[in-house]
Amino acid sequence: MIAHLHQRPRRLRTSEAIRSMVRETHLRPEDLISPMFVINGSGIAEPINSMPGVFRLSVDKAVTEAGVAAELGIPAVLLFGIPERKDARGSSARDENEAVQKATAAIKDRYPSLAVITDLCLCEYTDHGHCGVIEKGKILNDETLELLADVAISHARSGADMIAPSDMMDGRVAVIRAALDADSFTETAIMAYAVKYASAFYGPFRDAAGSSPQFGCRRSYQMDPANVREALREVVLDIKEAADIVMTKPALSYLDVTRAVREAVKLPVATYNVSGEYAMVKAAAEKGWLDEEKVVLEQLLSMKRAGADLIITYHAKDAARWLQQ
Ligand code: PBG
């Protein structure tokens, strides 16, 4: 006979009713942001091999897809553009006739209550695939800022609610904020990729967007995966520069970073469940090795538990469907 047990945590696990009463974290469709890849043309939905279920969509198809997300209770989409032409300075990024600008305008026109966030970076638009201007093999910070500001204005003009700079140049939030304000876009918010690590988990995205660096790597601008104190420095700087939402990225291998950021700041925190994290689950589920629905919902819940208010995820539509059942 064992000693009498007073403490029995299992009492609060005896039924779903009781479990639901003591549940500490909740996942809702409103927490999710659905990323989309947009291309020029019409009637196009090109599958992306390494990201089953994700497509490169022409503007018309992107509008339909955005409608599906809105219908499911997802409050926002995040747009990435794949341009017609690339050059050394990524000049097509600010072209009002490019896919992102057109898709933004078309989605806002058809679904005004859906928030449209635009990813702001040059890597999809440069022929060398880096996120900034290059001179003698180096990525130039301040020269890149001027280009980013122009791109931000073109996104705001097309109706973006929020701009999400993902380039990791120093000082870009301040420069983008100043440019937006100077053009009277004082209400356009900035969701800063404040803490973006140089991660191998972006592999499938670079296939999808054709944005792999043609030489070298991104370690001179994206963060070292070993560092967390530095993440807080990045966050503090972006907030001083007037970021409205700060993001950590990737999500799963960096839950500790999200927790640290959550504890350090009062702003909303977003985390990006990136392409490689998505691809791993999809591959295992295809083989029948994992229960996709259960694994995805558990992963998304872990990001909320770590302190994220918002989750950018390619699973957004599936997760919203599962949550509604
Ligand atoms: C552009 C950008 C990248 C991602 C988001 N914005 C790629 C990169 O930095 O190489 C990655 C998203 C994902 O993997 O899902 N700079």
Image (cartoon, grey):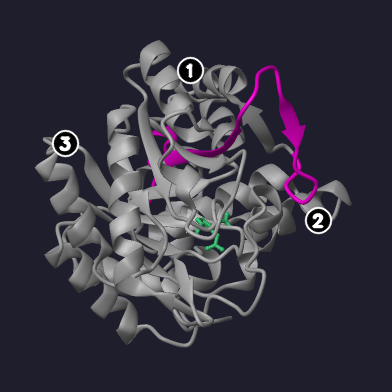
The disc placed on residue 6 is none
User: Which numbered disc, 2 or 3, marks the residue closer to the eye?
Assistant: 3
Distance, label 2 to label 1, CA atoms, is 29 Å
Identify whether 64 is placed above or below 173: above
Mark 1 CB in 8 Å range of ligand 1? no
315 left or right, relative to 189: right
Residues drawn in magenta: 25-52
Discs 1/3, front: 3
Query: What residue is disc 1 on?
Result: 71
| Label of residue 185 in the image | 3
Residue type, label 3: Phe
Q: Residues within 10 Å of mark 1 (few under 14, many from 20)?
A: few
Instruction: Kindly tell me whether residue 18 is visible in this rendering.
Output: no
Check the image and report above or below for 182 versus 104: below
Q: Position of residue 159 (x, y in %)?
A: 31, 27
Residue at (45, 22) in percent of width and height: 70
